Structure formats: C-alpha cells, structure tokens
Amino acid sequence: MDLTALQSGLDTIWVVLTAAMILLMEGGFALLEAGFVRQKNAVSIIMKVFVDIAFGALIFFFFGFGLMYGKDFAGMIGTSGFFMQGDLSHIDLTISHDTYWLFQCAFVIAVISIVSGAVAERINFHAYILFTVAMTGFIYPIAGHWVWSVGGWLGGLGMIDFAGSATIHALGGFAALAAAMIIGPRIGKFTDKGVANIVPPSNLPLASVGAFILWFGWFGFNSGSTLSATNGAIGHIAVTTMLAAASGCATCILFTMFRYRKSDPPMVINGSLAGLVGITAGCAFVSSAAAILIGAVCGIAMVFATEYLESRRIDDPVGAFAVHGVSGSIGTLAVGLFAQPELIGELGQGYTGLFYGGGFQLLGVQALGLAVIIVWGFGTTWLAFKLIGRFIPTRVSRDEELVGLDVGIHGVPAYSQEHDFIELGQLTREK
C-alpha cells in the first residue's frame, strides 16, 4: 500500500468515526430536551429528534448537499451534487465524496435539533416536519455554501468558522428565536402582567446525561473538522474544546451562586454547552487561555440572555437561543480577536486576530459574516413558518397542549404503570 492510499484510509476511518460521534449527539439532544420539558411532552421531543435524523439525512442527500457543496454559482449557491451525482471534482479531499457527505450530514442534523428545543411542548408535529425540510434542504445549505464551499462569498472574504459557531449555532439559535416568537409561549408560562412562571424540568439527571453526551460528541464535532487523521492540530482542538466547556460550566456554577444565592442546575448544564458552542469557530486558531476566556464569557452571557428572553415574554424551554444564538455569535467574533495562525500552520496563513497584530480586518469580516447569517437564519425561518401556517396550524390545539403532546399527538405517554389503561379515541390499550 502506498502512502497516498494509507493516508486516505486513515482519514476515512477518522471522518467516519467522528461523524458517528456527532450523530450520537442526537441522543444527547433527546435526553437533554426530554429532561428539560414536562413529563407529558417527553415522547414528542424524541419524535422530533427522529424527524431530524430521518428527514434531515434524506433531504440533505436529495438536494441539500448539492446546494451547499455543489459547483459554485456567483458565490451564492451550489449547482451540482444533487443525489450525490454530477460534478463534484472541485471537492479535493483525501476522503471520498460519500464520506464527506456523511460528516456534513451529521452537521445538518445538529442544526435542526437546535430549533427543536425552542418550540418544545406546543409545535404541531406536521409543521415541524415541513420546517425540517426547509432547514436541512435550503436554509442551512445556502448559509453553509457562503462560508465553507469552494467559491462561497463569505469564505472568499476570509471568514473563519472552523466547525460552525456561526454557520451552525448562530444560524440555528436565531432560527430557534424566530420560531419561538411566531409560535408563542406555552400556556401558563407568563402571567397577565408578563411575569414568567417557573416550569420545573421533569428530569434533571436525564438532562445532565444528555449534556454529557453532547460534550463527548463535541470532540468529534470540532476535532473531526480537520477531515484528516494526521493533522497535528487535533490535540490542540480537543484541549481548547475541553477547556472552554469546563470554563463555561464553572463560571455558571459560581455566577449563579452569586446571582441567585444557589447554583442553578439548568443554567450550569447550559453553561457547559455555551462554552462548547463558543469555542467551535476558533478551536483550531486560539490559545488555551483564550478558550478559557471565551467559555467564561459565553457562560455568563447565556444567563443574561435567558433572563432577557423571559423579560420579553419569549418562551424557549431549553434555552436554545441563549446557548446557541448568543454563544455562537460570541465565538464567531472571538476569532477576530484571538486567532493565532501559528497554532495550525497552513490553515491559519494570513489570519490573525486583533490582539495579535492583525488589526480590524478579520474582526470586520467575522462581524459581517455573523450579521449576514443571523439575518438569513432569522428571516428565512420567520418566512418559512408564516408560509407553513397558511396551509396547516403551526401550533397544537389548546386541549392537546394541556393534556400533553405525548398522548394528544402521538397517542402514548412516556411513562406508564403496569396494568394502566389509556383511552385514545376509540382505541383502548392495555399496558
């Protein structure tokens, strides 16, 4: 076996394994969100995750990948690669196009999963399926083309988003914000005077396990983005990922102790995720010290963002916007401040942050790219839900919401006792 074939084989194994790690994160999303919502809506969360995986993979295969990574047209859109056919010769990698699709498929599934939590406990399941098609087949692929595809206009300007703080997390976070605003808060979440009622999570240990799985999968998310098993930056990427997550978590423990006089478990869980989101753009380009700072800032910002949404009567049951939208934005801008090109060799040539003598050029590009992605994610999601709403309700009925989506929509509860009987329309099942 020659060295080229050996390199290709190693890289293929690496990318497939890290893609599997990212796909395992869907188990993390499922447990996290099921633990954060009320018991009567746990099955509905799991069903949405299955929609994310199944419909997301198929739609991305049919046309999402082509729009994202196909032959470039005017820096805006891909025009080949639909059904993984046509001209993909511009994708020059040591791995096959099929392997590359698998890795990118794991990313697109993660994007739609961000939105899932923000609309938990009240979205119409049919409407969610339609929005999944829109996000995985159009909204995310177009934004991804601008940043990551050969010829994409934001990438051409020099925007750096190594593993997706902007392209995945800020996009998904602001899409989640738009969806939550359109659908409205859960019944009883806010009083007539606008004061937020506390909706206790159904199972914090379950949510914690979900967060640990997400934390584990993030090593595949970030380190796998090298697309090479022999890239010397893998170790550094893993270290910055770990430190940012730990910093976001530790900061939230201390900050909530100071702010609320008690360490708030849901905030602490989301603090670790905020740190992970924040480091995703610059994990390969910033120092370990910068990673700790980024994680800490994201952790604190997440707390304030959560409080702000509630003050505006916007209901986000799992904190999707605060974790992904806010932290993704901070992480994207942080690259323009802390990027050190010597950390990653040729991938960093020409890119230097403001604090390392690079001036405002990279920071300006990062800010422009972030603004474009935010407007695109929020605006297209708003339009998508408005369009869907013209044909079917985007929200469940009041009765369905009160009884819970598990029984009201899916016909089965998450938890039942032996010998319980549940009447579902004209159907009675013995448990």
Image: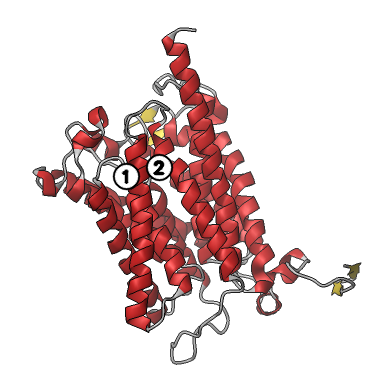
Residue 190: x %, y % from top left = 49, 85
- Lower sequence index among marks 2 and 1: 2
Q: Is residue 87 above or below residue 164?
A: above
For label 1, the residue is 283
User: How is the rendered protein coloured?
Assistant: secondary structure
Pointer 2 residue? 222
x 32%, y 47%: residue? 240
Q: Nearer the viewer, residue 94 or 47?
A: 94
Viewer can see residue 394: no
Residue furthest to the bottom in view is 193
The residue closer to the viewer here, 15 or 114, is: 15
- Disc 2 marks a residue whose amino acid type is Asn
The foreground one among 53 and 9 is: 9
Above or below, comparing residue 89 to residue 47 in the picture: above
Amino acid type, residue under disc 1 in the picture: Cys
Residue 156 visible in image: yes
Q: Where on the picture, by quarter, is residue 7?
A: top left
* Image coordinates for residue 194, horizontal then vertical, percent: 43, 87
Q: Residues within 10 Å of mark 1 (few under 14, many from 20)?
A: many
Where in the figure is residue 421, as x and y percent of width and height?
Answer: 88, 74
| C-beta proximity under 8 Å, tags 2 and 1 | yes
Residue sitting at 20 percent across and 36 percent down? 341
* Residue extending furthest toward the top: 2
Q: Quadrant of the C terminus?
A: bottom right
